[in-house]
Image (cartoon, rainbow, N blue to C red):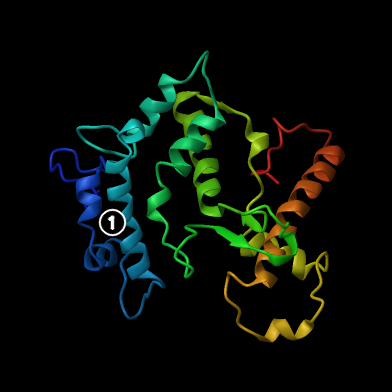
Amino acid sequence: LDGAFSSDAAVKTRVNSLALKQTTEASLARGFQVSSANPLVGLAGRTRLLRSLGEALEQSPQYFGEELCRPGNLVDYLLSHAEAGKVGLEHLWRACSEGLYNIWPLQPNGILRGDIWAHSKLQVSGKPGSDLVPFHKLTQWLIYSIIDVLGLSLGLKVTGLDMLTGLPEYRNGGLFLDSGVLLLKDPSWLSQEVNVGTELVVEWRALTVVLLDKLAEQVRKKLQMGLEDLPLTAV
């Protein structure tokens, strides 16, 4: 409301790339009311992400506009591909996955970017990349959120939702652990802090995705509902 993400003083609430690229830790801290008594973990990383978002918008004018690059121009892109009030998921996925690809930091290996990790047990000889597990948690989270907004504000329905997965994040994965659906082969891991890229975490998250699919089937069967009525977001 104060115009922190807009370079146009006349339209303070219209986010654009110019303002995003100028985001500072101080301005973000003011917006989030950060103080010693009210700290926010990862403020520096969030600031870098917003600046990267501004750059990504300018690198993908086909999705976010040419003269004034804005996240909101995504709506115009989707409407241009819509028919009879419906648009295919592939258009929204392309804009969020390809259009925002550069906002994600490179992994330590300097090759992979974003939420894609390797598991050695998946490696197939002669098939480069066969050991990679693409989660894209935050991209899918964003897409699920946008789908709701498009429906509520424009009555625009996104089709093809069965191509998305459940979210492999700590609440879903943690619930499977806490409820005993998943058990650690070596309980000593519970007392250790591990990197998100370790095979233990990759395997845990992959199992979470699979189990959410299986859980969704059971819940729909019990409630006698279909995918349209009870998508993975609801599960």
Kindly tell me whether residue 2 is visible in this rendering: no
In the picture, measured across the screen, residue 214 lies left or right of residue 199, that is right
For label 1, count other residues whose C-alpha is less than 10 Å away and answer few (under 14), some (14-19) or many (20+): many
> Which quadrant of the figure has residue 25?
bottom left
Which type of secondary structure does the marked residue at label 1 adopt? helix
Q: Which residue, given by chain and number where applicable, does mark 1 sit on?
A: 51
Residue plotted at (46% across, 21% down): 81
In the picture, measured across the screen, residue 159 lies left or right of residue 85, that is right
Residue plotted at (25% across, 40% down): 14
Question: Looking at this view, is 199 or 215 the one in front?
Answer: 199
Residue 7 picture location, percent across and down: 16, 46
Residue 202 picture location, percent across and down: 66, 65
Kindly tell me whether residue 10 is visible in this rendering: yes
> Which quadrant of the figure has residue 185?
bottom right
> Which quadrant of the figure has residue 173?
bottom right
109, above or below 228, in the image: below
Outermost residue, top side: 84
In the picture, measured across the screen, residue 36 lies left or right of residue 220, that is left
153, above or below 145, in the image: above
